[in-house]
Image: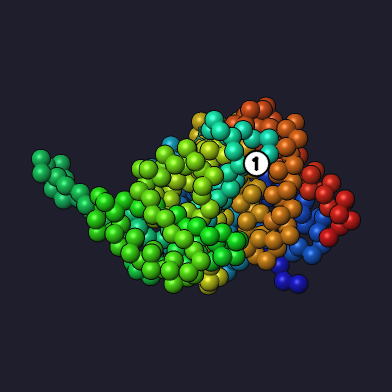
Amino acid sequence: MTAIKIAVIPGDGIGKEVMQEALKVLNCLQEQHSSLQIETTIFPWSSDYYVQHGCMMPNDALATLQTYDAILFGAIGDARVPDDVTVWELIMPIRKHFQQYVNFRPIKSLPGIASPLANGKEIDFVIFRENAEGEYSDSGGRLYQQQPQEMTIQNTIMTRIGIEKIVHAACDYAKQHGKTKITSATKSNAIIHSMKFWDEHTSKTVKQSSPALQLESIYIDALVAYFVERPQNFEVVVASNLFGDILSDLGSAIVGGLGLSPSANLNPEKDFPSMFEPVHGSAPDIAGKGIANPIAQIWSLALLLGHQGRPDLEQLIVKAISAVLQEGVVKTADIGGQATTAQMGDAICQEIINRTLTAGGV
Ligand code: NAI
Ligand code: MG
């Protein structure tokens, strides 16, 4: 059996702390399941690396990463390096070069976690965020700097192929999971070029994908309100890069916060490695204290294993997380407890061991 090769980039701040727990879970899985062969390599690319070398990662980093099956990423962001440098020298090149055009973010109620929403009904939907183009482009610039007439242009780039690919991915997921409704985030009443183009090609693609799928297009300002007022109505949400980014933090918040929210940056064709990372950043306000919630990172590892052909282990991790939360004894501060990052990682490992023993080993 060939091993799954994982490139591990812990990054900055709590990224390093939560990654330790994901690796602990991975070790535990390997001890329990002899069928799981994993090779990990840890890469120190981060703000520390930038301070030492003047760049976030070496010139040949993408070529190196391309030899791996998947990338497990922590988080980046550090006061010593401007945020646009950390993002555009590390995350963006990986997402764009490896054509990870799907950013997949499940938004799901968890047992033992109260939603801040008053009606407390079960929430279960997914967001497909376009991840390679759109509003997050480096096309633009400044003119007449420091003069009264100084100006800037920041271009949004939307391509027909880019829209078709993300919408197809959302439709394929819907069909595979028995969902019938696709919700598209738009603003074509005000952003009349790019968003009208988005609407047009979204509509064509959904129709082409399946006559059984129903498409609703909702203006982003109304959609954020609906996320709060009636999140139960959504099944599969598809959005451009910026809208999807904002919607996914809001989605995280309504099911209990950033500490619980995983994501996958997918290249569905598997031409390149995909990257799995929590939705959250490096959380400088709590970094170094050992109190960050590692669940988003551990769940991201679960998504990675599912993508690499081990949905059984993905399910096992998600069930172990749910069981620990339902029991409610070990909780980190963000979800109302006092447990440390390491204690949460230990509790999830213990649950994995218990479940494996009960199942008689796999
Ligand atoms: P953030 O996600 O780091 O933190 C927002 C809030 O959520 C903070 O109060 C933080 O303590 C809390 N939080 C986040 N993750 C948590 C966890 N696992 N457990 C408990 N609490 C958690 O976002 P913020 O503050 O906007 O950005 C901080 C830095 O992270 C910036 O430098 C930003 O550029 C970077 N960032 C990096 C991302 C990435 O690596 N993909 C994504 C988002 C932000
Ligand atoms: Mg974000």
269 over 291 or under it: above or below = below
Tell me what residue is drawn at x 39 percent, y 63 percent. Answer: 202
Snapshot quadrant of residue 331: top right
Q: Residues within 10 Å of mark 1 (few under 14, many from 20)?
A: many
Tell me what residue is drawn at x 24 percent, y 59 percent. Answer: 193
Tell me what residue is drawn at x 69 percent, y 49 percent. Answer: 318
Circle 1 SS class: loop
* Of residues 64 and 156, the one drawn nearer to the viewer in this rendering: 156
Snapshot quadrant of residue 215: bottom left
Residue 15 position in % (x across, y down)? 57, 43
* Of residues 106 and 270, the one drawn nearer to the viewer in this rendering: 106
Residue 324 position in % (x across, y down)? 74, 39
Give the residue pinned by disc 1. Answer: 110
Q: On the rendered structure, is 126 left or right of 164?
A: right
330 over 205 or under it: above or below = above
Tell whether circle 1 marks a residue whose Cβ is less than 8 angstroms from ligand 1: no
Residue 1 position in % (x across, y down)? 76, 72
Q: Which of the image's four quarters has the C terminus?
A: bottom right
Tell me what residue is drawn at x 62 percent, y 56 percent. Answer: 303
Residue 50 position in % (x across, y down)? 45, 48
Residue 28 makes an appearance in the image: yes
* Of residues 334 and 68, the one drawn nearer to the viewer in this rendering: 334
Q: How is the image coloured?
A: rainbow
Q: Amino acid at mark 1?
A: Leu
* Of residues 121 and 53, the one drawn nearer to the viewer in this rendering: 121
Q: Residue furthest left?
A: 148
Q: On the rendered structure, is 347 left or right of 153?
A: right
Snapshot quadrant of residue 2: bottom right
